[in-house]
């Protein structure tokens, strides 16, 4: 922050034209014997209390030294070329004004933010009448750390006991210990190249080199997997047993909207800002769109609880060195579900079912979670037994991070972590209980007594983002291979579920007929009609992890059968109809999508 002090005999201002979409009311004003504090808020400045107390202390001390009877805080963008974004700058100026007012005994005024203003100033001209300052947020951090009550962690066990993480016995709890090491003791994660990265190329998950860092591209195989997970996320949401509305919306929102601006502050420098006729941000989840939509609905208590789900293309400005394929991205797809409930009690009841479904879905991959519960101190004191009940349902300890004296829009924010093949905790699913955003966005319902109320909102990604769910799938494959097993994708997720391989050209017609039958049953099937040896075709299908390789030759054609090589299983003969029935049973309860490639392999260009 850069500040210019002018001790003025008199000072007045008059707002003229708007300069920004984010702005205050255009109020004129004047002061005499005033210390005018021209303020430029720079990138990296924040409304941190410790920082602003340090700035305010200097302002008040200077005012007293020069004998000023009033102070004017004046937003002034012309002292710096590295300005903060308007929504941050306005908050910093507003908070500085409040802190100065609390410390100074005389009159404190603030000129409006966001305008071109005319002003008249008569400087008194003594040696201290013109001073400049530069304030750095980091200089106030040491003092703040000494003053604030820090977050602390406890291990909560299913029997309700509370333990010090440093003294807890982790015998037989290696995954939970890894979570505690990372979150509590901030110990470095194990290094090494994760094996799942070797799998991604075959399925077309890649970085896009012609875009910003952290942006991916998805080949046809990857695309069908992404869309299957998107479809499945909606099916899973509906399994909660409440009404769920699926919507679509925009990914750009105006920072001039108060609700958007105040919510966006939570993400700070991680925001993507788009400069257009007005400052826009790219959303980092589906919150903005869903809240903007639901505020226009007429909602009764009889409608609650209900959910909204959107597959939201989301943007987070992660650090370049931290981006990881499928796991940490700047642009990703989030099956974001928000559940609107009457009150905190109902929200907690709904989360019991939500918790069950989150663990059910990761269990289908043969995995489980270790859990970090971030809670406000008030929530922990008032609802500790609720957390114990969740630990009981998990059947193992949970890590609880308690945040004393801090205000968030949520009272509970849960992170569910798998531990990957390198022993590193990786957050996949999540849910939050939000007690602030309904009021911020103007979302209301009418209760049994015809009173207007604000719902409590549950934020959740049951599967995690689409990419992170697939990360968990491929990491499971890596663990299988590490254990000496054959990696095999779930059949419902396999881009090609069956590959038909004719032994010779003479068998191609029969191969196509078998493919027609399987495709009619909703099975993704292709045909290897290339002029290659049978052994190479089988080898290529195995390399592509096709779960069912079907070989047809003259003998099979004469018998009306197929020879099936099942990935990770044996080889057997069957009727094509029998194979179709087997695959249908295997993918029952999961979504279907067609093949996103030409059926014939001879029609596909090779990739570098």
Image (cartoon, rainbow, N blue to C red):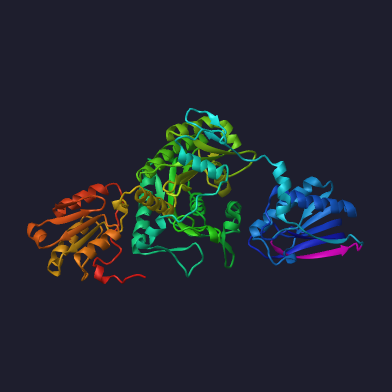
Q: Position of residue 312 (x, y in %)?
A: 45, 56
Camera-side residue of 374 and 321: 321
Q: Position of residue 442 (x, y in %)?
A: 55, 48
Dividing the image into 4 quarters, which one contains the N terminus?
bottom right
Q: Position of residue 129 (x, y in %)?
A: 88, 60
- Residue at 64% over, 57% down: 87
Judged left or right of residue 560, residue 363 is right
Above-or-below relation of 34 to 240: below
Q: Is residue 124 magenta?
A: yes
Magenta span of residues: 114-125
Camera-side residue of 78 and 152: 152
- Residue at 30% over, 55% down: 494
Judged left or right of residue 510, residue 184 is right
Viewer can see residue 65:
yes
- Counting every numbered tag in the picture gives 0
Camera-side residue of 173 and 306: 173
- Residue at 65% over, 60% down: 86
Most common SS among magenta residues: strand
Viewer can see residue 451:
no
Dividing the image into 4 quarters, which one contains the C terminus?
bottom left
Residue positioned most to the right: 126
Above-or-below relation of 246 to 539: above
């Amino acid at each position: 922050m850069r500040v210019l002090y002018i001790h003025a005999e008199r000072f007045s201002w008059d707002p003229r034209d708007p300069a920004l979409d984010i702005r205050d009311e255009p109020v004129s004003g004047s002061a005499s014997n005033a210390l005018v504090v021209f303020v430029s808020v720079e990138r990296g400045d924040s409304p941190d209390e410790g920082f602003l107390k340090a700035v305010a202390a200097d302002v008040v001390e200077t005012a007293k030294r020069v004998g000023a009877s009033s102070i004017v805080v004046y937003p002034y963008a012309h002292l710096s070329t590295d300005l903060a974004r308007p929504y941050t700058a306005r908050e910093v100026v507003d908070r500085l004004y409040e802190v100065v007012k609390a410390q100074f005994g005389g009159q404190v005024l603030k000129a409006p933010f966001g305008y071109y203003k005319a002003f008249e100033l008569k400087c008194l001209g003594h040696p201290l009448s013109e001073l400049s300052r530069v304030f750095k947020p980091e200089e106030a951090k040491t003092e703040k750390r000494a003053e604030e009550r820090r977050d602390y962690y406890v291990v909560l066990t299913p029997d309700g006991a509370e333990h010090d993480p440093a003294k807890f016995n982790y015998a037989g709890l290696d995954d939970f210990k890894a979570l505690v090491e990372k979150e509590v003791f901030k110990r470095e994660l194990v290094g090494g190249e994760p094996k799942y990265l070797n799998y991604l190329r075959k399925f077309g998950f890649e970085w896009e080199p012609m875009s910003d860092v952290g942006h991916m591209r998805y080949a046809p195989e990857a695309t069908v997997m992404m869309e299957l997970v998107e479809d499945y996320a909606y099916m899973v949401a509906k399994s909660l047993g409440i009404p769920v509305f699926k919507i679509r919306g925009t990914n750009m929102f105006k920072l001039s909207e108060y609700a958007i601006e105040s919510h966006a502050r939570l993400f700070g420098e991680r925001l993507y800002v788009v400069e257009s006729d007005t400052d826009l941000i790219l959303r980092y989840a589906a919150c903005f769109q869903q809240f903007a939509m639901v505020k226009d609905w007429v909602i009764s208590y009889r409608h609650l609880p209900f959910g909204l789900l959107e597959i939201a293309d989301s943007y987070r400005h992660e650090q370049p060195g931290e981006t990881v394929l499928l796991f940490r991205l700047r642009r990703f797809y989030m099956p974001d579900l928000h559940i609107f409930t009457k009150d905190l009690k109902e929200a907690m009841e709904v989360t019991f079912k939500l918790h069950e479904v989150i663990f059910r879905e990761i269990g289908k991959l043969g995995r489980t979670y270790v859990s970090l519960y971030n809670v406000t101190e008030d929530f922990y004191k008032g609802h500790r037994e609720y957390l114990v009940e969740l630990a009981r349902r998990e059947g193992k300890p949970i890590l609880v991070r308690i945040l004393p004296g801090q205000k968030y829009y949520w009272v509970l924010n849960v992170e569910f972590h798998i531990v990957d093949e390198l022993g590193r905790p990786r957050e996949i699913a999540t849910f939050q209980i939000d007690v602030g955003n309904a009021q911020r966005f103007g979302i209301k319902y009418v209760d049994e007594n015809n009173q207007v109320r604000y719902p409590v909102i549950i934020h959740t990604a049951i599967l995690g983002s689409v990419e992170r769910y697939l990360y968990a799938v491929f990491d499971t494959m890596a663990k299988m291979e590490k254990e000496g097993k054959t990696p095999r994708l779930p059949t419902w997720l396999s881009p090609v579920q069956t590959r038909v391989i004719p032994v010779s050209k003479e068998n191609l017609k029969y191969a196509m007929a078998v493919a027609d039958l399987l495709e009619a049953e909703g099975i993704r099937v292709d045909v290897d009609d290339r002029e290659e040896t049978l052994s190479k075709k089988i080898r290529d299908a195995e390399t592509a992890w096709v779960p069912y390789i079907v070989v047809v030759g003259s003998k099979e054609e004469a018998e009306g059968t197929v020879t099936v090589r099942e990935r990770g299983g044996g080889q057997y003969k069957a009727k094509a109809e029998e194979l179709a029935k087997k695959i249908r049973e295997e993918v029952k309860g999961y979504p279907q999508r067609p093949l996103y490639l030409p059926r014939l392999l001879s029609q596909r260009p090779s990739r570098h």
